[in-house]
Amino acid sequence: MLSIAERAAAPETLPTPSAGGLTWRAWTRQDVPALAELMRTVQEADGRDWFTSPGEVAETFDVPVFDAATDTIVGLDADGALRAYAHVEQFPTDGVTTLRVFLHGGVHPTHRGQGIGTNLLAWATGRARQALAASGTDERLAGLPGRISAHIEDSDPAERHDLLRAGGFEPVRYFANLLRDLSAPLPVIGLEPPLRLVQWSEALDDAARLARNDAFRDLWGSQPRTAESWRAYRSSFAPQWSFLVVDESVRYEGSEQEHPGDPSVPPGTPYVVGLHMAGRYEHDWESQGYTAGDTDLVGVRRDYRGRRIAAALLSHAMHVFAGEGMQYAVLDVDTDNPTGAPALYARLGYTKNDGSTMYAIEI
């Protein structure tokens, strides 16, 4: 079998975009306000009602695997205004079974139709291939499969789908965005002892991460989170809306027990078996036309499934959301989720609002 370095077929040098007469360079932190403004303009033109906030752009610079000099590019017009961008998102490789790189990018509506998007995709795909090839220097990773992927929203123009297909990408997965009207009667679902629902806390954060890693091991495309990557992208994290379920009958011996070499969770820490991590995206409420509590992540350890833990977490979250005046509960789901999650959400009253498609090149 060829190594990832050979399979990635990485270019020695990246093709600098030439279309549209723009000047190209890497992102800087000083670009954050202008990048957020450009992304919002692109997303509005694509028909979206949710947007990338300045805080979300800023936190990109602090994720565990990020080098602005090599993984970002932005195009400026003659007046110095930002008109196009791309970002190649890499992920930690600790314990993974698939090497992944995710592509982001867009072109200002006034500069579309000039080939800039095609140029950007070629640059980003080339950079992604370089990143995957670099993994081959670690013999533990050299034989792993690789994936270059990008998301397209259902509301995005058809040209975005065409662009990705022309670039060698194929649709591989479909996701649904679900809403639950909180003005309708809310379920009350409890837990049987020794299970107990508790508020998220910093002291239990890494225990929640380990529960998440176990819960998502059999979900397509999921890879384990490291302590660093688990804490990334939290500019909209809502700790007051985040909850955990612990098993009080277990004397947990700590993370070393299930992940040798990982001392992040000391012995005696409550054993987290389920988690609900939420986000508060206030910057989207006006454009969406409603307020919402977002379930960014819900999961249950595999040995604890079938005990209504996810249902209890979601029903509790609904009551908390409604108590703070939210009109809807929101979450996303893989439509082919093998755990029965789509059926659970339907029973709890969630209905589809919109969706997205993941395109990928498998390597």
Image: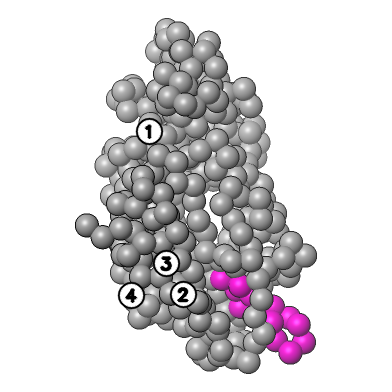
Assess whether mark 4 and mark 2 are in contact (beta carbons under 8 angstroms). Answer: no
- Marks 1/2: CA–CA distance: 39 Å
Determine the residue positioned at 55% across, 25% down. 264
Q: Is mark 1 on a helix, strand or loop?
A: helix
- Marks 3/4: CA–CA distance: 13 Å
Badge 3: residue crowd in 10 Å (few <14, some 14–19, many ≥20): many
Determine the residue positioned at 51% across, 43% down. 296
Assess whether mark 2 and mark 1 are in contact (beta carbons under 8 angstroms). Answer: no
- Residue hosting label 3: 129
Q: Which amino acid does label 4 sit on?
A: Gly
- Residue hosting label 1: 215
* Quarter of the image with the C terminus in it: bottom left
Closer to the N terminus: mark 2 or mark 3? 2
Q: Decide whether residue 219 is among the magenta residues.
A: no
Q: Decide whether residue 83 is among the magenta residues.
A: yes
For the record, the magenta segment spans: 73-86
Determine the residue positioned at 61% across, 59% down. 67
Compared to residue 174, the image places residue 321 above or below, namely above
Q: Which amino acid does label 3 sit on?
A: Arg
Assess whether mark 3 and mark 2 are in contact (beta carbons under 8 angstroms). Answer: no
Closer to the N terminus: mark 1 or mark 2? 2
- Marks 1/4: CA–CA distance: 32 Å
- Residue hosting label 4: 168
